[in-house]
Amino acid sequence: MKISASIYSDKGNDIQQTIQNLNDSHVDMIHVDCKDDLNVFADIEKIQASSVIPIDLHIITEKPQRFYSALENFDIEYVTFQYEDLEDKTLDIPKEFMGQLGLAITSGTDIGVFEAYKEDFDFILFMATIPGESGGKFDKSNFRRIREFQKRYPNKRVHVDGGVNAEVSFILRNMGVFASVSGSYLFNSANINTALLNLKLNEIESHFLVKDFMRDLNESPHQYANNLGLNRILEVMNDGKLGFTMILEEDGTFSGIIGNADLRKGLLNHMDDLNDVKVEEIINRSPITIRDDYTVYQLLRFIKKQSSPIVYLPVVNSEGKAVGTINFINLIKGEL
């Protein structure tokens, strides 16, 4: 996951010193917040004169047309418009602008508003705190909204701004988020390089629970024990695209899983007659599971104790009922 450093969050240095510090830290992008002020392009000119780091411009304005001329003249890599502030929701971006376009929405705005922009816009920016303000706490409802957006628009990228610390960064990386904006966490740390490393690789604090960011049961491949035909299992695994399906009793109690390896073994044992494959015999009845009330810190400690690599985990509640899943595909792919 790429880290976009919010340049105006650095209150301790002038802009030239901040640019130099970001150059030295090799941050991925420089995030520039613009609250309806064309003077922002003077700062962008300074940044471009002293750095080759891509610029990530977030424009908050009622009248976006005021900025079109500057967008034609400046080579800016990422430009995002704040949806809620737009007086006219129609955005007629000049064709001369060659960068990527994004739509920013707050936590209270339905992700469906992106539908009108999907042909021309490249990404969405989830504002997890109040737009333009630094130091807020991440609104956990955005974990679910990110998953919903990814399902609806699988070819569009997700950016996140607001409340991104080391723990939130870990969760967002695991969810496959393309870029996150960091301001207060990055610049209020004793060392930018250490803070940047934490955002990219580590987990330190722990305030969120597994149930805050897991795939809910309705998003997870599962099948009830009273309907275990091989055809049905294959359909569920194929539709789920996660390489496994959970098996549940009628009351939702978690009973086991069938993974790709279990399925292959069952088929190989009955190659002479696949009709002899009995699904009940290939269920793994004692797989590793995780509780939904585990913190991120507990989750990571649990994973580190396992002797084999963990690709996915069924999630159960205190009563042993299946409530969802988490997977680590994006981390394993190295999308950090």
Image (cartoon, rainbow, N blue to C red):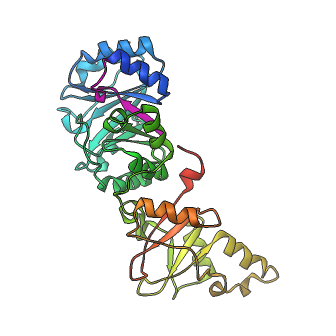
Give the magenta-colored segment's residue range.
1-14
Image height of 61 relative to 331, above or below? above
Residue occupying the point 30% across, 42% down: 162
Q: Please provide percent x and percent y for residue 285.
A: 59, 83
Residue occupying the point 56% across, 61% down: 304
Q: Please provide percent x and percent y for residue 209.
A: 37, 63
Image height of 80 relative to 111, above or below? above
Image height of 188 relative to 152, above or below? above
Image height of 63 relative to 72, above or below? below
Q: Along the line of sight, which residue is nearer the eye, 278 or 194?
A: 194
Q: Along the line of sight, which residue is nearer the eye, 221 or 53?
A: 53
Q: Quadrant of residue 117?
A: top left
Q: Along the line of sight, which residue is nearer the eye, 289 or 64?
A: 289
Taking the magenta stretch, the answer to whether it contains residue 287 is: no
On the question of residue 240 being in view, the answer is no
Q: Please provide percent x and percent y for residue 163.
A: 31, 44
Q: Quadrant of residue 35?
A: top left
Q: Please provide percent x and percent y for residue 226.
A: 51, 88
Q: Is residue 10 left or right of residue 259?
A: left
